[in-house]
Image: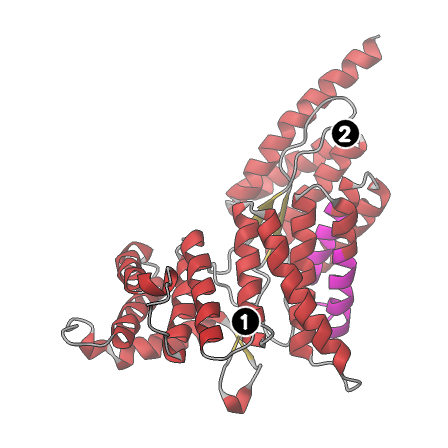
Amino acid sequence: MCSKISNLPKIFGGAQITHNFSLRIQPDGIHSSPRNVRGFCPYREYHHSSEDKGTPFSNAKLLGASTLVAASIFSSFFDDGGKSKEDTLKKHIGMCTMHLHQAEPHFAKPHFDQAYELLKDDLDRTKETPIPNLRIAYLTDQLGNIALQLECYKEAINLYMATINGFALNGIERSNRTVTELFLKIGQIYAILGEYKLAEMSFLHCVGVTTLELSKSDEPKNPTVSTLAGLAYEGLGKVYLSMNLPENALNMYKHAFQFAGALFDPNDPQIPVLLNDFATVYEALDQYDMALEKVENAIEKAKVANQAALPSIMCNKATILLFSGDLISARSLYEELLQTCLRIQDYETIREINANLKILKEKERLQKECLAE
């Protein structure tokens, strides 16, 4: 989900995250290709200052702030003698940020590896391991964000869990909003890795914490907490669809869309992504009329608010037509969309189209055999 309160930090450089969903066995025995429902990483980052608690900031600000940190310690980049653990971490995080900002991940990776090694004791904590101060915990969180950008997903999980442990050792409860954000990140990464039960546990923790906080007060609901709750429900929707539990997924998306409707501008760019996910759930439930209705709504919204997502949504429409049995319309849309994607070099959607065209070809063959009989 994405909102007018703040844009999601584009931790992956603005790229969309692909979620591969379960294969579905059709009555004619043909298996569909993994379904791709794309959405921005469902979490946000927040300032932690006492003056501005809960104020979201964009990834551009995140990178900008880290770049300033890098600049402020630039003179010490190449002189690590006698520096403390904290200063050495700042040095490597600053260098990672600088190289990532310059699109040089290959230069960032060695600095990440050194910083990760420096936190080895915190990642594999024993009774003898010293308790980290909060500054180290926040630096560990920053290094987790860098791990995400480098697509070092398992390392990112380890760093975020170490951050949560560091907070706990400094008296910060697991119900703290900052910890909730970390669990959202962890849930998203587990979903990317296909560890759906672990992703489910992370998102359920977020749902429990946020809904409890929202239920405590009769005052207007805190938009930050509502946003986090909506993101957690959306994450659960993706996970349940991946686990081939479309009924559960539909339930979660309904909750997510309620939060989106209450918080977001109607032309928010993530609205068509949510509608497209809804369409995929209805298709999984064999409710093709509802699926087509949702995907048409998603297309209209994307034309106004999120043209980058339009090829993916159009591909989803073709796939719904394919499995609803409208093979002629599906082929026409796939072929038209393929030319568009070749022109704009959308290789991810091209791969999905080509995979589904193979399924379509087989369905057409079977249909001809049935007619011949």
Sooner in the amino-acid sequence: mark 1 or mark 2: 1
Furthest residue toward bottom: 51
Residue at image position (56%, 56%) is 188
Kindly identify which residue carries mark 2: 328
Mark 1 vs mark 2, foreground winner is 1
- Residue 108 relative to residue 369: left or right: left
Magenta-highlighted residues: 252-280
The image shows residue 280, relative to residue 357, as above or below, that is below
Q: Is 175 on the left or on the right of 287, as rendered?
A: left
Quadrant of residue 139 in the image?
A: bottom left
- Residue 94, horizontal then vertical, whole percent: 30, 71
| Residue 80 is a magenta residue | no
Would residue 369 appear left or right of 20 to someone viewing this image? right
* Residue annotated with mark 1: 179
Across and down, in percent, residue 157 comes to: 46, 58
Q: Residue at point 58% right, 59% down?
A: 40
What kind of residue is marked 1? Answer: Val
Looking at the rendered structure, the secondary structure element under dot 2 is: helix
Q: Amino acid at mark 2?
A: Ile
Q: Is residue 304 above or below residue 198?
A: below
Residue 270 seen in the current view: no
